[in-house]
Amino acid sequence: MNDSKEFRDLLEGLEGTSYHEALSKVPDPIKADQEPDLDLENTIDDSQKKDLSRRYSLGYFGQFHYGVFYAHLKLKELEIMNIVQLAEIHSMKAIPRNHPAWNKSVVPF
């Protein structure tokens, strides 16, 4: 995986892991640059945020260890990042309300 030069090499290296499923939904960035019609609604960063949110939410199932407090802090951090991102989009005033950037927030649960 460390020797991956292209996105598909990374996907092949992650085959058989839980990350492969998350990254298989992401379009190849090189193809996205070449084809402007390809929608980059789900980027690698969005995929990672969703995966982290899912994993931190699983910390609540045990509820008998200190990992719950850590998961709570990390989910609050994701929530604050969502609010900051929406505030920055709103302050630009250049993006209409129906633009896909408004739907980029990651729901914690």
Image (tube, grey):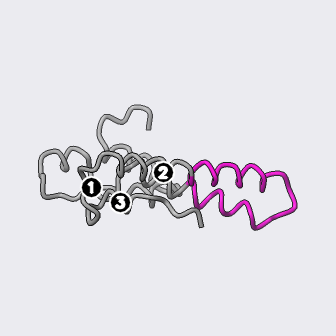
Q: Secondary structure of the magenta portion, mostly?
A: helix
Dot 3 or dot 1, earlier in sequence: 1
Classed neighbour count for the residue bearing mark 3: other residues with Cα under 10 Å, few (<14), some (14–19), many (≥20): some
SS label for mark 3 = helix
What's under tag 2, amino acid-wise?
Gln
Q: Is residue 11 magenta?
A: no
Q: Which mark is residue 102?
A: 3
The residues bearing labels 3 and 2 have C-alpha atoms spaced at a distance of 18 Å
Q: Which residues are magenta?
A: 52-79
Question: What residue sits right under mark 2 in the picture?
Answer: 48
Q: Is the residue marked by circle 2 packed among few (<14), some (14-19), or many (20+) residues within 10 Å?
A: some
Q: Secondary structure at mark 1?
A: loop
Quadrant including the N terminus: top left
Residue extending farthest right: 64
Query: Circle 2 sits in a helix, a strand or a loop, which is it?
Result: helix
Residue placed under numbered mark 1 in the picture: 40
Query: Residue 2, how many percent across, how many down?
Result: 44, 33
Mark 1: amino acid? Leu
Q: Earlier in the sequence, mark 3 or mark 2?
A: 2
3 or 2: mark nearer the eye: 3
Q: Position of residue 99 (x, y in %)?
A: 26, 61
Q: Position of residue 83 (x, y in %)?
A: 50, 52
Mark 1 or 2, nearer chain start:
1
The mark tally for this picture is 3
- Identify the residue at image location x=45%, y=61%: 21
At a point 18% along the width and 49% down the height, the residue shown is: 31
